Amino acid sequence: MDLHLCHDAAHGGGVWTGRATAGCCVFRSVVVERTNVAVGCCLIARDAGCSLSAIREKRLNGAHTVIETAHLTLRPYSPDQLLALIEQPERFEAVAGFPAADGLRQFMVSDDVSLDWLPGLRASRGRPPDPWVDGFAVVHRDGGVIIGNAGFKGPPDQGGMVEIAYGIVPAFEGRGFATEAATALVAFAFASERVRLVRAHTLPAYNASTRVLAKCGFHFVGDVVDPDDGPVWRWERRAQSLDHGGTP
């Protein structure tokens, strides 16, 4: 399966913020900040097991980045798009350029959403896209509909670590789309010279999310206690790690 990042002139993106357990969106420990990130355009060849076998990077001057996988297109969200989804869902398609699949809005309005996130999002109206903070809409290309979200807890930290988060609506689960979205996030992260480690967390049990992460080359690190979510399993993948992940 091939994955590449390409220039998007027609659609702009912007805001997925907060924390999410891999496989389900959980907006906590919110990070809403503006970063000046130079986003590259990359051609990434991968095998079916989601390992990154080749990366070629070139810079784009101020262009938004769109990530294309075999079946999906990941387009950067904007604060205005997310606010439309939350507050005026009837306007979302006009603002985002694509309709939302059933269940997409629930990712943003569930009880797991941080109380601090929405005020920060409202304060970001009109801000240009920042994929590290805002994340991506996961578009099913054949259907032309947004079927999920994919993003990061925030920009890379001082140690070069980012945490990924992704969610696919129920009607589109079980088709490998979560794996494609997760792999796209890993590719995007490692295309940046700032990232040396990609991290994810799952519930402490074997499930679809653990299988996705193992397919995408993540290694099981161990049990940790998250201040918001309690006991979770930690998974990590380091730059240039081409092998498949370990298991608990």
Image (spheres, grey):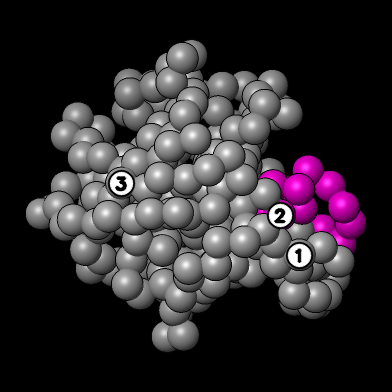
* Numbered label attached to residue 9: none
**The stretch drawn in magenta includes residue 209:** yes
Residue at the image point whose x is 67% and y is 58% from the top: 244
Considering only order in the chain, which callout, 2 or 3, is on the residue closer to the N terminus?
3
Task: Give the residue at mark 2.
Answer: 214
Residue at the image point whose x is 43% and y is 21% from the top: 141
Dots 3, 1 in contact, CB < 8 A? no
Element under disc 2: helix
Considering only order in the chain, which callout, 1 or 3, is on the residue closer to the N terminus?
3
Residue at the image point whose x is 49% and y is 35% from the top: 1
As drawn, which residue projects farthest toward the top? 143
Disc 2 marks which amino acid? Answer: Ala
Whole-angstrom CA distance, mark 3 to mark 1, is 27 Å
Foreground pick, 153 / 160: 160
Whole-angstrom CA distance, mark 1 to mark 2, is 7 Å
Asked if residue 182 is positioned above or below residue 243 in the image, the reply reads: above
Element under disc 1: loop
Disc 3 marks which amino acid? Answer: Leu
Query: Neighbour class for label 1 at 10 Å: few (<14), some, many (≥20)?
Result: some
The span picked out in magenta is 203-214
| In-image side of 231 versus 191 (left or right) | right
As drawn, which residue projects farthest toward the left? 61
Query: Neighbour class for label 3 at 10 Å: few (<14), some, many (≥20)?
Result: many
**Residue 174 visible in image:** yes
Element under disc 3: strand
Considering only order in the chain, which callout, 2 or 1, is on the residue closer to the N terminus?
2
Task: Give the residue at mark 1.
Answer: 246
| In-image side of 193 versus 112 (left or right) | left
Asked if residue 98 is positioned above or below residue 42 in the image, the reply reads: above
Foreground pick, 7 / 98: 7
